[in-house]
Image (cartoon, rainbow, N blue to C red):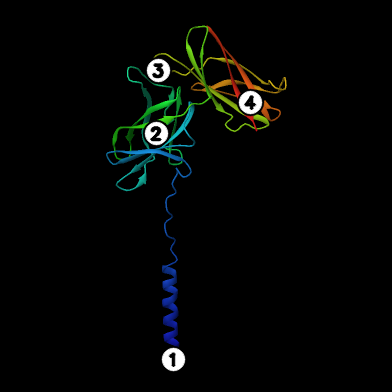
Amino acid sequence: MKYLRLFIMLVTSLALFLSCGNDSTAPEEQTDPAEGLILLGESTIQNTRVSLYTDKALQVGYNHFYIKLTDTATDKLVEEAHITISTLMDMGQMQHASPYENPPGDEAEHGLFPCAANFIMAGTWELGIQVQNHLNNDQGEVRFNLDVAAGSLLKSVVGTDSLTYYITLVAPDTPQVGMNDFEITVHYKESMMSFPAVEDLTVEMTPTMPSMGHGSPNNVNPAHQHAGHYRGQVNFTMTGDWRVDLNFSRADSLMHTSFDINVP
């Protein structure tokens, strides 16, 4: 009986030891920060894989992009890098760029480097991505060909100063009855390859419902925030087709455009 008790104690101790050994939590798998996004293409710069994503189909106007960098030797995300982008449409005898926005800093946001391009016409565009990987010092450039569909979110307007301005509707993306955030970007054509942001405009906004013959109260005119982005609020008081008229003024120029918005 004595030896039986000792045997039972040894078996129990061994079971407890094995149980404790197996209790360690396995390392969690790394969540893909690009989950749910649309992959547009991948390429490599030495030991750095460059993956380009967007959140919806590309069209004329303002398009969000997200760049993911991965160290191919370790398969780990690169969280620090200097990235700049460029746009180009090659039409044979003529080439031109479009407005674009580089990532705001050298640190990834939730594993991705956000940026944007404001395509001014439909067709095939080339998006260049210049990378300097702070992790392993890889540096170079990759290029992706992108098909951009026609759209109604960008207007080209010639001001009284004879400059061509590009005004793009960014928000509301999904308009609804009530107050909506309203955002536009404004750039001008300095040359075929340069489209600086315009930051000194005064904007007056007037929403109307042409089929009903009325407007709406309590709208907030868009005001400049940063890098050519103007934000305000628009009030859609009922479902249907609305028109938002925009009058712009600066020291030496006046211009006007409008956007038609359906509120479901």
Considering the image in quadrants, where does the N terminus appear?
A: bottom left
Q: CA distance from mark 4 to mark 3?
A: 30 Å
Residue 51 in view, yes or no: no
Q: Residue furthest left?
A: 46
Amino acid type at circle 1 is Lys
Residue 86 appears in the picture as rendered: yes
Query: The disc labelled 3 sits on which kind of residue?
Result: Ser
State the image coordinates of residue 152 (x, y, percent, origin top left): 53, 24
Between marks 1 and 2 in the image, the one whose residue lies nearer the viewer? 2
Q: Is 14 located above or below residue 96 in the figure?
A: below
Sooner in the amino-acid sequence: mark 4 or mark 3: 3
The residue drawn where x is 36% and y is 46% is 76
Quarter of the picture containing the C terminus is top right
Q: Secondary structure at mark 3?
A: loop
Give the percent coordinates (x, y) of residue 79: 39, 40
**Which residue is at a point 29% across and 34% down the rendered structure image?**
139
Q: Please, what secondary structure does the residue beneath circle 4 have? A: strand
Which residue is tagged 2?
106
Q: Quadrant of residue 247?
A: top right
Q: Nearer the viewer, mark 1 or mark 3?
A: 3
- Quarter location, residue 66: top left
Q: Earlier in the sequence, mark 1 or mark 4?
A: 1
Labelled pair 2, 4 in contact (Cβ < 8 Å): no
Residue that numbered label 4 is attached to = 233
Between disc 1 and disc 3, whose residue precedes?
1
Label 1: which residue?
Answer: 2
Label 1 vs label 3: CA separation?
92 Å
The numbered disc on residue 194 is: 3
